Image (spheres, rainbow, N blue to C red):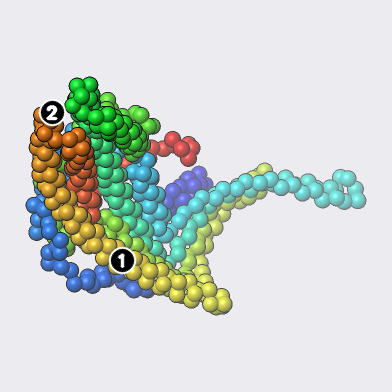
Amino acid sequence: MTGRRALLLAAPLLLAGCWSGLGDWGDWSPFGDPVGPDYARPAQPDLPAGYRGPAPDFVAASAASDADRRAASRWWTRFEDPLLDRLAARGLTENPEVALADSRVREARALLTGARAGRRPTLDAEAEAGVEGRRDYAEREADEERDLGGALGLAGLFDWTLDVFGGVEREVEAAEAGLRLVEAERRDAALAVVAQIARTYVTLRGAQTRLDHSDEAIALQRESLALVRGRVESGLASELDRARAEAELSALEADRAPIRTEIQRAASALAVLTGAPPGALPDEIDTPGPPPHVADGPPIGAPLDLLRQRPDLTAAEEALIRATAEIGVAEAALYPSFTLPGRLGFELSDVFTGELVASVVGSLFLAIDAPLFDAGAREAALEAAYERAEQAFLAYRAALLTALEEVESALDGYAGAQRRVRLLAAAVEANRRAFEQAEQRYSQGLANYLDVLDAQRTLTDRRLDLAVAQTDLALEAVALYEAAGLAPLLPDVPPRPARTAARS
């Protein structure tokens, strides 16, 4: 009995080892093709062979090489600003949106593991122990009988739902697409974070440049005011010239305050984007610098390349794949389900009576659950699944067209910003010469102060316009890289360590 008891006690463990070996099935379905439509990539619309808008030098016909893709994934380094590089790297590791995307990937992995588990049998262990007593009463006390007995039992329970119509396979397909979807969304979130960091950094540097120009204009106006005062005291100019010079100085000083506010807000936003509280930025951020400039860049590819690399388009297609698989899940619910429940156990009875009885109990059944009437609920669920797939298809087409439109718009914006910078640079140089001539003629008494004031105001405005245009050019470059879907290359999401609470 000892050997038989050991064998029966080990039976559940042996069954568990057998069922775990079924994990090697992979994607094999033993009962034929699953119900529901198989996914087929939608036909692409007629795509342009090239860009409609003028493309800068770093828009190439193709960006298919690995070197191009690696370079494109770190497009912000083309600004050649070490501080921006550090802020982008910090944002990719510390920004809460990226961490949230990592968590969603881990969640999708867990859901996929659960879906794949539906392919395999389940095995549970069951143990029970009990004591029972009995007393029979008779007319004479000597005839009374008392019995005390007990029972012990150990069993292995297994259950296997046969995937006859492929509903489980479709669930696995949907979960796999769901994982790929959130992985694409993770790349898209990283791209959005880096692009927003770059935009905020460019805005901050542009505001600092405008503040420098404003300070220079104020210093220049103070010199002009000193010149006017000297001429007024010498009787060579009127009090009106001095009043105009003082008013212009006050106006320039008033325009300085909003620029400082813009700098402070941009710095606070930049800190939050890098996962830090406002004010927690490197000291180098306080040192003014010009807006970063992109002299060249990695090729972003032709329109067809964009469809392959934009993470939002990848996510939209994976959503369509998932919705298509869910049609099969809903259709499989219309058909009967077949289950193999089983039990193998070892029982001991009459433990305390001295007449120990051991028995082995086993059972195996085929259970069929066939839907008969549900008032149309399953058919409605199938119809809803078809509509969700249609919605996913329309969302995919919309995302595709939006991607092409965003690139064309970014190309137009970049080209326009380039032209504006060139023209404003020439205008600033011409206005500088005009101001110097006007100031010289005023000092010689050959012109009135209105000429000087007008030339100085025009020079100040053009310099500020140039700073804004340079900022806009850098922002348009960021928009072009983002529209091209040049997402950073991210490491795989590591599994979360074991924990005892929801937060760690």
User: Marks 1/2: CA distance?
Assistant: 65 Å
Q: Quadrant of the C terminus?
A: top left
Task: For label 1, count other residues whose C-alpha is less than 10 Å away and answer few (under 14), some (14-19) or many (20+).
Answer: few
Up/down of 341 relative to 382, above or below: above
Q: Residue flagged by tag 2: what amino acid is it?
A: Ser
Give the quarter of the image for residue 271: top left
Does the image show residue 116? Answer: no
Which residue is disc 1 drawn over? 398
Residue 408 percent across, percent down from the top left: 20, 60
In terms of sequence position, does the residue under pointer 1 or pointer 2 come before the other?
A: 1
Marks 2 and 1: in contact by CB < 8 Å?
no
Report the front residue among 212 and 251.
251
Q: Where is residue 152 shown, x and y percent of the image? A: 60, 47
| Residue at (77% x, 49% y) in the render | 134
Secondary structure state at the residue bearing disc 2: helix
**Could you say which is closer to the camera, residue 207 or residue 236?**
236
Q: Where 353 falls versus 160 (above or below)?
A: above
Task: Tell me the mark number nearer the camera, choosing from 1 and 2.
Answer: 2
Q: Nearer the viewer, residue 293 or 139?
A: 293
Question: What residue do we see at 15% from left, 64% from top?
Answer: 52
Crowding near the residue tagged with mark 2, few <14, some 14–19, many ≥20 C-alpha atoms within 10 Å:
some
Looking at numbered disc 1 in the image, what kind of residue is underneath it?
Ala
Residue 287: x, y in percent?
Answer: 23, 27
- Residue lying at 29% horizontally and 31% vertically, measured from the top left: 243
In the rendered view, does 353 fall on the left or right side of 6?
A: right
Q: Specify the quadrant of the image occupied by residue 250.
A: top left
The residue to which callout 2 is attached is: 443
Q: Quadrant of residue 226?
A: top left
